[in-house]
Amino acid sequence: RKHYQMSFAIDTWYDALKEHTFRTESFPLTYLEGCALGTYKDKRTEKDLEIIGQIADKIDVILKKHFPNGAFVKLNTRSPKDVPVYDFNNEELQQIIDDEFTSLDQNHSFTDETWAFVKATNKSMRVTNGQEAIRLLANSTRIYEDLSSMLNFPEKYFKASLIIREWIDEVSQHPEMEFRGFVHEGKLNAVTQYFSFVYSQALVDRKNEISRLIREFFESVSHNIPHPSYVIDFFVFQNDKVYIIELNPFHIGAGAGLFTWRENRQLFLEGPFEFRVLETVPDDPREEIPIRWIKYLDAKYHPELQKKKEEEESPASESYFSYCMIL
């Protein structure tokens, strides 16, 4: 499975598709660098911290040379997007969230608040220097898990890279325009809204148009994609241009959005093509926001709700904020 997942890493398809994706730079991690980043944060030694500092320096050089507007940083496997969702005490993130919320109309809905939260956590992924990048990478459970898995094998099999990608503000400002597709034997059989837990009237209104844009784009580039079956993420810009975000293995481990692997496997394999967006507002539009963030938001923006909840509160588990489950 590890080999199969690695075969979809960005360095396996970027050159063939670089005209249709975000500008990207990368560099390989040495085994020692992987060990340092892959050591749980509370157990890192002074030597680990020194090596991590050297990684930050390498990132700095690339950012200054290629990405003056900042960048998105990830491993060649997954990104550290779990960090902002659970970085409850990060004052910089709190400020980004507050900025999004104060920009909402006075009569905004809970759906608007959920989109604001998604935008804020997305925007917090922008890095402008090596230290910001390391803060994300070194505190991510996803990065820790991926490196730990790689480090279970002998050094000669270690193959990890840091990927640094162009930051485009529109992508973080319009998360509703991200989509996930399911391709089997070269055929795009299904596409879903990526942030499948948030309603967007604009998506409902433009559903057929967006479906056409994605399918036409896919037909124009699919011959360059070096895999027969895969999960593919798209972004549709306001000017109707479509970009590929990334490829993932055609596997149950890839989140299915408004589909499920159990119920829609045959559709993924054979079609006919189906495009899904969330058609109605969920009963609780904020359900996927972690409880501690809900408490933070209610204390600042809905004190009457916070007081009521405190009176009624019973033990509850944290929501996992489902988009973190998507590879």
Image (tube, grey):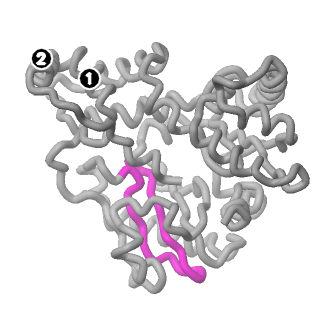
In the image, the segment drawn in magenta is 176-195
Q: Residues within 10 Å of mark 1 (few under 14, many from 20)?
A: some
Residue 93 in percent (x, y) is at 46, 21
Residue 43 in percent (x, y) is at 69, 25
Observer-nearest of 207 and 126: 126
Observer-nearest of 110 and 309: 309
Q: Residues within 10 Å of mark 2 (few under 14, many from 20)?
A: few
Magenta-colored stretch includes residue 28: no
Q: Quadrant of residue 257?
A: bottom left
Decide whether the magenta segment is chiefly helix, strand or loop. strand
- Residue found at x 27% / y 28%: 294
The Cα–Cα distance between marks 1 and 2, rounded to whole angstroms, is 10 Å
Is the residue 19 above or below the residue 307 in the image? Answer: below
Residue type highlighted by circle 1? Lys
Q: Quadrant of residue 64?
A: top right
- Residue found at x 86% / y 36%: 32
Residue type highlighted by circle 2? Lys
According to the picture, the residue beneath numbered tag 1 turns out to be: 295
Residue at far right of view: 156
Q: Is residue 96 left or right of residue 33?
A: left
| Mark 1 or mark 2: whose residue is earlier in sequence | 1
Residue 212 in percent (x, y) is at 41, 69
Residue 27 in percent (x, y) is at 83, 42
According to the picture, the residue beneath numbered tag 2 turns out to be: 307
- Residue found at x 38% / y 57%: 193
Observer-nearest of 285 and 205: 285
Q: Quadrant of residue 279?
A: bottom left
Q: Quadrant location of the N terminus?
A: bottom right
Q: Is residue 263 left or right of residue 67?
A: left
Magenta-colored stretch includes residue 181: yes
